[in-house]
Structure formats: C-alpha cells, structure tokens
Image (cartoon, rainbow, N blue to C red):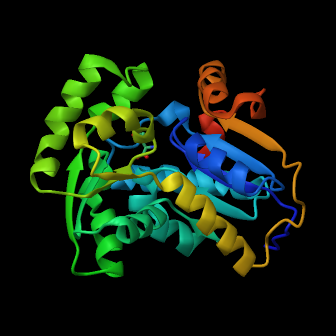
Amino acid sequence: MSLSKNDPIGIFDSGVGGLTVASEVMKRLPGEDIIYFGDTGRYPYGSRSPEIVRKFALQNVGFLSRLGVKSIVVACNTASSVALDVLREKFPLPIMGVVEPGARAAVEATKNGILGVVGTRATIKSGSYNQAIKRLDPKLRVIAKPCPLFVALAEEGWTKGEVAKLIAQEYLHSLKQEGVDTLVLGCTHYPLLRAVIGEVMGRGVGLIDSAEETSKELKELLKKENLLNPRKEGGEYRFLVTDNPEAFLRVGRGFLKGKITKVELVEIERLKGEG
Ligand code: DGL
C-alpha cells in the first residue's frame, strides 16, 4: 500500500465523542484533509466485550483504509484500550490511539504521584491506562474507576445541574479520598462534563483530556513517517456515520461550527466484509 502526504487522515469513534479529537487535529494541522467515521449505528462500545469492540475496530479501519487514508487516529478510549495492538498488526499504516497521549500528559502533570483515571467499564477493565502510566513511571499510583453514567449524561445534554453533580459526587468521592492530584478523563464524552467533574474534585486536581495531546503526537507521527501534508491551510473534511446522520450533524455543529455541513450515511452491511 503506498501512502501519500496528500491523503486524508482517518479518525474514528463509536459516535460523536471523537469530534473533540478531530477538532484539535483541525486546529493543529489545518492543511490536512480528514475523514471522520462515527459508528453511531453500533454505539456504545464502552459496555461491550473486548472481542466485539476489536471486531468493530478492525472493520472500521478496513473501511477507512479502502477510502485511501494515510493514517488512523482511534479517537475512542474503549477501542484504543482493547484494539490498538490488533489494528497495528493487521494494517500497514501508522495508527495511534488516545490512551498513550493521555497517560503521558497525566504523568507530566502529577506532583504527588497519585493519579486517577475515569472511563467506560471496558476501558477500566482493560487496565490500559494503568499499564501506559506504569510504563512511563512504575512508581506512580493509579486509581481507576468506571463511570458509565457520565456518557448517558453527556448524550442527554445533562452536563450541569443537580443530577450531574450528584452522580459525579457518587463516582468521584473515593478518588478524592485517595488524594489524587491529577484525573484523566479517559472517555471521549467526559470532557463535556469537565465543569462538574472539576467542581466535585476541587481546584487542586488537574483534569487531563487527551484530545489536545493526541493532536500533538499525531503531528509528530506524521512528521516521522514523512506523511505531513505540506499545505498550511485548506484541509477538507468528510463525515460518515452508520446511523442517524441528522442527529450527528446537530451535535457536530456544536463541536465544529462551520466545519461540518454534511454527514453521509454508510450502511453497516458495507462494513461486514472489512477488517
Ligand atoms: N467513545 C467511547 C470511549 O471513549 C465512549 C462512548 C461509548 O461507550 O461508545 O470510550
């Protein structure tokens, strides 16, 4: 497979959450074309088994590869946690996830060496953040906690107010008691609840969102692979989903403003032969 600097970058997530990553990539690399794929028809990934998430991830990357992308960003913590190895084994193009960049940022930020990680059940059960953090510094303590209702709150738009606060208090009090000074928001949806999570954790706790860090590492990766598009602006964007393009467009406009005007539907059946 020959990859060219002018080819687009492929970014995928189970739905809209990965647009936080896409938005950072657009800011940092404005000359790059992007194909964003949201697997809205098979969302959510976070409560599924690793086997099925791996299967979906392989199909998604197979599909994006056939559209001619030069690299892939797995902009979903769950898929990054359980599928990155198999994707890298199977596809001969640079593939990165969001776990390692988030872990690196957290390790740099902590002062007292006690880190918290919140994510979906699948992400926390995989131990991916724990391993990535310990690889960087084995002396650090990592306390991980699944917070599945945060995704539902974000999807529902209940990112502020009493309900969000009560749920956040319930999930986060043990992390507070352990004295974490840095908390990784290890799920694409959680940055939407940043204000309430920050309020519950208190001022002294730094919140890490891997979107920005991922865009920095993507730039380095493309440079290293000699795949950085020399164009400085004018990147073009395509958005593809497996269900409900209208809803995606509505939410997407909130994230990306004028950068998203059209969303294309892909039949899930088309993905079945991929991967
Ligand atoms: N994108 C998923 C993640 O970052 C959250 C939503 C889902 O469960 O699919 O883990």
Q: Taking 232 as reference, is 185 above or below it?
A: above
Q: Taking 111 as reference, is 18 above or below it?
A: above
Residue lying at 44% horizontally and 34% vertically, measured from the top left:
192
* Rendered location of residue 173, percent (x, y): 13, 42
Residue lying at 39% horizontally and 40% vertically, measured from the top left:
190
* Rendered location of residue 80, percent (x, y): 45, 59
Is the N terminus in the top left, top right, bottom left or bottom right quadrant?
bottom right
Left or right placement of residue 215 versus residue 224 in this view: left
Is the C terminus in the top left, top right, bottom left or bottom right quadrant?
bottom right
Q: Taking 241 as reference, is 63 above or below it?
A: below
Return the residue nearer the eye: 97 or 1: 97
Q: Taking 223 as reference, is 267 above or below it?
A: above
Left or right placement of residue 132 versus residue 10 in this view: left
* Rendered location of residue 57, percent (x, y): 52, 53
* Rendered location of residue 256, percent (x, y): 68, 34
Residue lying at 75% horizontally and 64% vertically, measured from the top left:
70
Left or right placement of residue 50 versus residue 202 in this view: right
Residue farthest front in this picture: 203
Left or right placement of residue 32 versus residue 139 in this view: right
Return the residue nearer the eye: 59 or 183: 183
Q: Is residue 92 visible?
A: no
Q: Is residue 109 visible?
A: yes
Residue lying at 31% horizontally and 66% vertically, measured from the top left:
110
Tell me the quarter of the picture where residue 171 sits.
top left
Tell me the quarter of the picture where residue 249 sits.
top right
Tell me the quarter of the picture where residue 245 sits.
top right
Return the residue nearer the eye: 47 or 11: 11
Ligand 1 shows up in which quadrant of the image?
A: top left
